[in-house]
C-alpha cells in the first residue's frame, strides 16, 4: 500500500519472483516523495565514509537510534542509489561528477539532488517508469485502503475502496504498508493532503506495535503567505548561504547556535518561533539577495517559480517563512527485515519506525531510508513467500462492528479544528497544560466520530487522524523531558536516566 519511494521500491524488488498489487489512494505520483526537494544523503563522494554518516545520524538521534538499523540504511544506501541511477534517475552533475551539498547536522557534503530542487520528482518518476514496465506489478490508483484483514495475529491482506468499484477484499500472502506520514494532522504542514496517517492507524487497529509517536519533525522554513499552500523552502537554501532574518531585518541564528542557519532543524524551528514571539510577527524571512541571481535561479528553479507566482523575486526580495510539521519520525515498529510485530505484515519508509532517526532526523536521510527499507520489505516478503508452504486461503468475514450509519457531522469542520488544536497544543513547543487540553478535546471529538460507519475517505481519514493525533498527544504527555524534536517547555532538560527509552503503543 502506497506508491512513494518506499512502496515502489518494495514493489520492484518483490516483483522479481512474486506478483505484486500496489494500492494507492490518489494518483500514483501524489505523495510526500514527489515533493522532496533537498536531496538524498548518501556516501558516494571521495573523502566521505560510512562511519561518518553513521556517526552524524546517531548524533542527531540523541540516544534513541537503533544502531543496527542506521548501519544497514547507511551502508546499503550507495547500492540502492547506484541502482536508481541505472534505472534512469538523473542527479545533478558538474563535469560528469555528481554534485554534493551539505545540510544541517551532516559533517560532510553528501546530499545529491536532481534539477536543483526537484529531487523527489526525479526519484518517483524513475521508479514509476520501471513499475510500468514490469508485467507482474499492477497498480490500482484512487483506491483507498480502509483496514487490514487479520486473524489470529496474522495479516491476510486489506479492505480497499474505489469510488466506482466500491469495496473489495484483497487477499495477499504478504502485505506491505508504505503509506507515508501524517503531517496533515497539523494545520501548518509541508505534507500533501494524502498524508493523514492511515497506515499508522490501520496497523494499530490490527494490533501492531507503534513507537516514538511523540517525535514529529518540524521543518523550519515553509513559505508563509496567507492563502498559499505551505510550500517548502529547502534547507539547502540555507546550505547555499541563505540567512534568516526577523521582522526588523536582524540576523538572529548566531545568537542561538554556533552553526547558525545550519544548526539542527529543531533548534532552528524553536529559534524562529522565539523570534516570531519577540517581534510579534507571523513569520521570519530568508535572505538570499547576496547570492548571484543566475546561481539562485539555476540552483532553485522550482522555488523561484513558486515565489514568482506570489510576486516575490528571490534575488531581490526577502522570502517569508515559518516552521511547519514535516516528518513523522515515529510509526509502525519494524525489525531489520522491515517486518512489523504482526505476522505477514511489513512496513517501510515514513510509515515505519525503523530506528533510523531516533529522536531527530537528519535532512535527506528519509529518501535513503525509503529506498533501503522498501527494498528490504520487498525482498523479505517475496523470499518468505517462496519458503512458505502455507497457502493463501480466503475466508468469509462475518464480523460487523455495529457502528452507527447516521451522522450529522460536518467532517471538514472537525478536521480543521483538529489540525488547529494539534498545531496550538502539540506543536514545536509543548507543555502539560496544553497537551491535557488537546487530549480532552480529541477524546470528545472521538466520542462522536469513532462510533460512526462512514462510506468514503473523508470520514475514514478523519477517524485515522483522530487516532494518530491521540497517540502523538499521549506520547508527548508521557515523555517528561526534551529530546530531539520533542520540546517540553515544562521539562526543558534531556533526562537520560529516566527517558533514554522508547514509548510504544499496542491495542
Ligand atoms: P510517501 O511518499 O508519502 O507515499 C505514501 C503513499 O501512501 C502515497 O502514495 C499515498 O497515496 C499512499 N497512501 C496513504 N494512505 C493510503 C491509504 N489509506 N490507501 C492507499 N494508499 C495510501 N526527505 C529526504 O530525504 N530528502 C528531501 O529532500 C526531502 N524533502 C521533503 C520535502 C517535502 C515537501 C516533504 C513533504 C518531505 C520531504 N522529505 C525529504 C521527506 C520524504 O519525502 C518522505 O519521508 C518520503 O518521501 C516518504 O516516502 P514514503 O514512500 O514512505 O511515503
Ligand atoms: C529540505 O529540502 O529541506 C527537506 C529535506 C528533508 O526533509 O530531508
Image: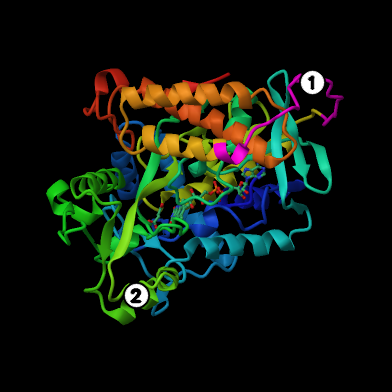
Q: Is residue 377 among the parts visible in the rendering?
A: yes
What SS does tag 2 mark?
A: loop
What SS does tag 1 mark?
A: loop
Q: Is residue 338 among the parts visible in the rendering?
A: no
Q: Position of residue 363 (x, y in %)?
A: 37, 51
Circle on res. 400: 1
Q: Position of residue 500 (x, y in %)?
A: 31, 24
What is the total number of numbered labels drawn onto the structure image? Answer: 2
Report the span colored magenta.
391-413
Snapshot colouring? rainbow
- Of marks 1 and 2, the one in the foreground: 2
- Please state which of residues 476 and 62 is positioned toward the viewer in this rendering: 476
Q: Is residue 75 above or below residue 486?
A: below
Q: Is residue 47 left or right of residue 148?
A: left
Q: Earlier in the sequence, mark 1 or mark 2?
A: 2
Question: Which residue is at 78% across, 47% downward?
Answer: 163
Q: Is residue 480 above or below residue 115?
A: above
Q: Is residue 172 left or right of residue 474?
A: right
How far apart in space, not on screen, are marks 1 and 2 (Cα)?
57 Å
Question: Which residue is at 44% across, 61% downward?
Answer: 37
Please tell me whether the stretch drawn in magenta is mainly helix, strand or loop: loop
Q: Which residue is mark 2?
A: 313
Quadrant of the frame with the C terminus: top right
Q: CB of residue at label 2: within 8 Å of ligand 2? A: no
Quick one: label 1, few (<14), some, or many (20+) residues within 10 Å? Answer: few
Q: In which quarter of the view is residue 396 placed?
A: top right
Q: In which quarter of the view is residue 496 placed?
A: top left
Residue 402 highlighted magenta (yes or no):
yes
- Please state which of residues 188 and 370 is positioned toward the viewer in this rendering: 188
Q: Is residue 305 left or right of residue 259?
A: right
Quadrant of the frame with the N terminus: top right
Amino acid at each position: 500500500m502506497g506508491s512513494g519511494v518506499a512502496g515502489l521500491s518494495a514493489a520492484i524488488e518483490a516483483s522479481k519472483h512474486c506478483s505484486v498489487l500496489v494500492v494507492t489512494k490518489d494518483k500514483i505520483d501524489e505523495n510526500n516523495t514527489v515533493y522532496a526537494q533537498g536531496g538524498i544523503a548518501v556516501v558516494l563522494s571521495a573523502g566521505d565514509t560510512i562511519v561518518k554518516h553513521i556517526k552524524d545520524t546517531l548524533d542527531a538521534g540523541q540516544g534513541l537510534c537503533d544502531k543496527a538499523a542506521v548501519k544497514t540504511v547507511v551502508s546499503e544506501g550507495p547500492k540502492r542509489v547506484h541502482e536508481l541511477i541505472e534505472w534512469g534517475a538523473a542527479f545533478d552533475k558538474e563535469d560528469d561528477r555528481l554534485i554534493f551539498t551539505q545540510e544541517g547536522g551532516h559533517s560532510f557534503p553528501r546530499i545529491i539532488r536532481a534539477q536543483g530542487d526537484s529531487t523527489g520528482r526525479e526519484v518517483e518518476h524513475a521508479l514509476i517508469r520501471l513499475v510500468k514496465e514490469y508485467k507482474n506489478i499492477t497498480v490500482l490508483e484512487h483506491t483507498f485502503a480502509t483496514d487490514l484483514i487479520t486473524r489470529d495475529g496474522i495479516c491476510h491482506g486489506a479492505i480497499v475502496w474505489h469510488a466506482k468499484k466500491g469495496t473489495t477484499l484483497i487477499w495477499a500472502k504478504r502485505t506491505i504498508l508504505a503509506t507515508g506520514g501524517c503531517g496533515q494532522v497539523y494545520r501548518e504542514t509541508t505534507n500533501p493532503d494524502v498524508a493523514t496517517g492511515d497506515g499508522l492507524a490501520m496497523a494499530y487497529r490490527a494490533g501492531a506495535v507503534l513507537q516514538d509517536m511523540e517525535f514529529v519533525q518540524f521543518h523550519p522554513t515553509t513559505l508563509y503567505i496567507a492563502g498559499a499552500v505551505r510550500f517548502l523552502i529547502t534547507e539547502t537554501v540555507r546550505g547555499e548561504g541563505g540567512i534568516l532574518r526577523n521582522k526588523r531585518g536582524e540576523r538572529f541564528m548566531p545568537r542561538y547556535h554556533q552553526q547558525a542557519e545550519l544548526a539542527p532543524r529543531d533548534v532552528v524551528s524553536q529559534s524562529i518561533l522565539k523570534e516570531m514571539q519577540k517581534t510579534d510577527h507571523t513569520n521570519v524571512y530568508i535572505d538570499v539577495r547576496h547570492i548571484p541571481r543566475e546561481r539562485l535561479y539555476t540552483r532553485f528553479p522550482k522555488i523561484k517559480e513558486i515565489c514568482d507566482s506570489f510576486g516575490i523575486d528571490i534575488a531581490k526580495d526577502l522570502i517569508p517563512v515559518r516552521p511547519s510539521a514535516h516528518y513523522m519520525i515515529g510509526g509502525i515498529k519494524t525489525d531489520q527485515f522491515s517486518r512489523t510485530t504482526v505476522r505477514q505484515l511489513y512496513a517501510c519508509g515514513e510509515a515505519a519506525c525503523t530506528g533510523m532517526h531516533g529522536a531527530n532526523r537528519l535532512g535527506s536521510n528519509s529518501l535513503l531510508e525509503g529506498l533501503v527499507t522498501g527494498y528490504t520489505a520487498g525482498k523479505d516478503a517475496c523470499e518468505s513467500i517462496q519458503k512458505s508452504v502455507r497457502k493463501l486461503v480466503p475466508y468469509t468475514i462475518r464480523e460487523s462492528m455495529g457502528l452507527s450509519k447516521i451522522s450529522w457531522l460536518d467532517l471538514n469542520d472537525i478536521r480543521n479544528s483538529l489540525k488547529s488544536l494539534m498545531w496550538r497544543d502539540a506543536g514545536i513547543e509543548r507543555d502539560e497544560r496544553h497537551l491535557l487540553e488537546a487530549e480532552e478535546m480529541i477524546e470528545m471529538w472521538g466520542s462522536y466520530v469513532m462510533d460512526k460507519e462512514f462510506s468514503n475517505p473523508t470520514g475514514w481519514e478523519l477517524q485515522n487522524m483522530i487516532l494518530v493525533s491521540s497517540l502523538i498527544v499521549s506520547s508527548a504527555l508521557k515523555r517528561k523531558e526534551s529530546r530531539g524534536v520533542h520540546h517540553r517547555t515544562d521539562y526543558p532538560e534531556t533526562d537520560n536516566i529516566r527517558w533514554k527509552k522508547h514509548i510504544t503503543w499496542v491495542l
